[in-house]
Image (cartoon, grey):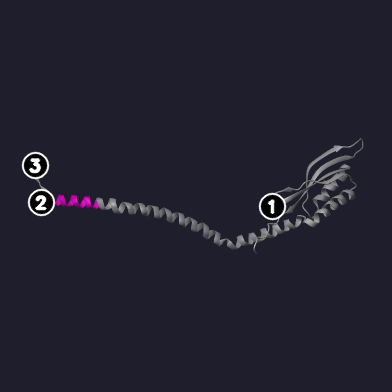
Amino acid sequence: MDLQELNELDLESIGTWPKLAKIVFVVVVCGLITAGYYYYQIADEKTKLVQLEAKEQELRQKFEVKAALAGNLPEYQKQVEEMKKAFASLLKQLPEKHEIPGLLDELSFIGIDNGLEFRRINWEPEVEHEFSTELPIKLEVSGSYHQLGAFVSAVAALPRIVILDNITMKKQGDGGTLSMAMLAKTYRYKEKPAAKGK
């Protein structure tokens, strides 16, 4: 079969074609059908398969993370309990409302017990924070270096949290007396208001 015979082939007279031409025609048609089927069916399914495999990997990773968390759940629960106890312990170190005036008395007593002279002791305006209220006290005392050091140490040893801030010291007169001004801050925990209707 040469090129001229190939050009003379007509689809309407396919039955009279040579055997080789029929075989080639069938192979070409089958190839086109297969290519079309692949393009319209398998290619879409392959894309979906790739997407599903990626989703499977993502879900597998999430599962592994959650399985690790679930495996460590008893430890996490134990840590949460320990944190709750530590938080409760810290809350106990903050003075309650009825203890605030007593804190002022404690500071006065510590200062007098250490031989300090109080020049000023005033409550400053409260400062609201998200979880607490800051209660600042402005103090001015005078005494020797060692008396001031003993006062600061005694305040640090109080069972309640008291922070000494903005400390300034200056020499007073010719003797060894020093004047110290500071802001003593303590905090009161702001409890969340109870939900209405309960």
Could you tell me which residue is drawn at 40 percent across and 54 percent down?
A: 53
Majority secondary structure of the magenta segment?
A: helix
Residues drawn in magenta: 21-34
Quadrant for the N terminus in the image? top left
Q: Nearer the viewer, mark 3 or mark 1?
A: 1
Q: Compare marks 3 and 2 and give the one earlier in the sequence.
A: 3
What is the spatial separation of the Cα atoms under label 3 and label 1, in whole angstroms? Answer: 96 Å
Q: Compare marks 3 and 1 and give the one earlier in the sequence.
A: 3
Residue 183 spot, x, y in % from top left:
79, 44
Q: Which residue is mark 3?
A: 4
**Is 30 positioned to the left or the right of 17 in the image?**
right
- Residue 174 found in image quarter: top right
Q: Secondary structure at mark 1?
A: loop
Indicate which disc residue 14 carries. Answer: 2
**Which amino acid does the dot numbered 1 rest on?**
Phe
Residue 3 spot, x, y in % from top left:
10, 42
**Which amino acid does the dot numbered 2 rest on?**
Ile
Residue 64 spot, x, y in % from top left:
50, 58
Q: Is residue 95 magenta?
A: no
Could you tell me which residue is drawn at 10 percent across and 44 percent down?
A: 6
